[in-house]
Amino acid sequence: MSYSQPLSILSRKWKSLFLWGILAALLTTSLSLLFPLEYRADAAVYIISKSRYGVDPYTVVKSAEQVGQNITQVIKTQDFFDKVISSVPANFDTTQFQNVTDRVRAKRWQKSVDGSVVFGTGVLNLSAYNRDPAQAKILAGALVDTLVQKGYEYIGGDVTIKQVNKAIVTRFPVRPNILLNAVIGFCIGLLISGAVIFSRSKRFF
């Protein structure tokens, strides 16, 4: 079989390939819908490292980046969880964290919050996830407030944290990522169907 023959075979079967890709995309989309749809609220803080004499601005920014990286891990801890929950408004629903084991509570908290540092800056993005967009916004606001008020406990007194973006909620659910899952499913469907068609055609050569 020449190298051009596989492509010729697949091109003749493009309708079958496309159909199986669509079916796989529909399957992955259906499976995605079995999971709870969650919204994300995003807020941001700016990490300000106190400049020291003789320290260049680049070093100051890199120091702020490192502090931000540390904070992304701190916000997922039990201690930070306790601080946030003790300060959230009364209208925040804490039911998912109640009457469960410490392990389950920790896993749920770690799935509910996230952080990322903007490279080359001292900006730290904070995200909160919830099925209710209003609850996600409240939680994101509580994350920021806790960092601004009590962040010094984790980073020392040489760093100041200032809120630069209030919490904004996504218009549509972001978890699970239905569109991405559908695209992945479509590609998998194409690959599997292509492999099956090609393997069957080899019997005739």
Image (cartoon, rainbow, N blue to C red):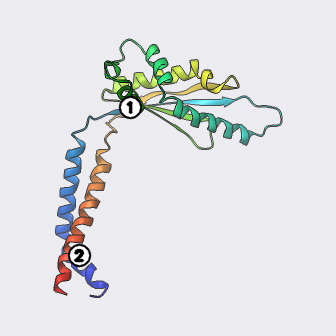
Percent position of residue 130, x then y: 34, 29
At horizontal 19% and vertical 51% (from top left) the residue drawn is 27
- Please give the name of the residue rendered at 36% of the width and 17% of the height, measured from the top-left corner: 92
* Residue 56 locus on image (x, y percent): 77, 40
Q: Position of residue 91 (x, y in %)?
A: 35, 14
Residue beneath label 2, please? 10
Q: Are marks 1 and 2 in contact (CB under 8 Å)?
A: no
Q: How many marks?
A: 2
Which of the 4 image quadrants contains residue 168? top left
**Quadrant in the picture for the C terminus:** bottom left
Task: Specify the amino acid type for callout 2.
Answer: Leu
The percent coordinates of residue 12 (x first, y second) are: 19, 77
Q: Earlier in the sequence, mark 1 or mark 2?
A: 2
Q: Is residue 147 above or below residue 204?
A: above
The residue drawn where x is 63% and y is 27% is 155
The residue mark sitting in front, 1 or 2, is 1
Q: Is 108 located above or below residue 19 in the figure?
A: above
SS of the residue under disc 1: helix
Q: Residue at the location (18% across, 80% down)?
A: 201
Of the numbered discs in the image, which one, if any, rests on residue 107?
1
**Category of crowding for the residue at label 1, using alpha-carbon neighbours closer than 10 angstroms: few (below 14), some (14–19), many (at least 20):** few
The three-letter amino acid code for the residue at tag 1 is Lys
Q: Is residue 39 above or below residue 190?
A: above
- SS for callout 2: helix
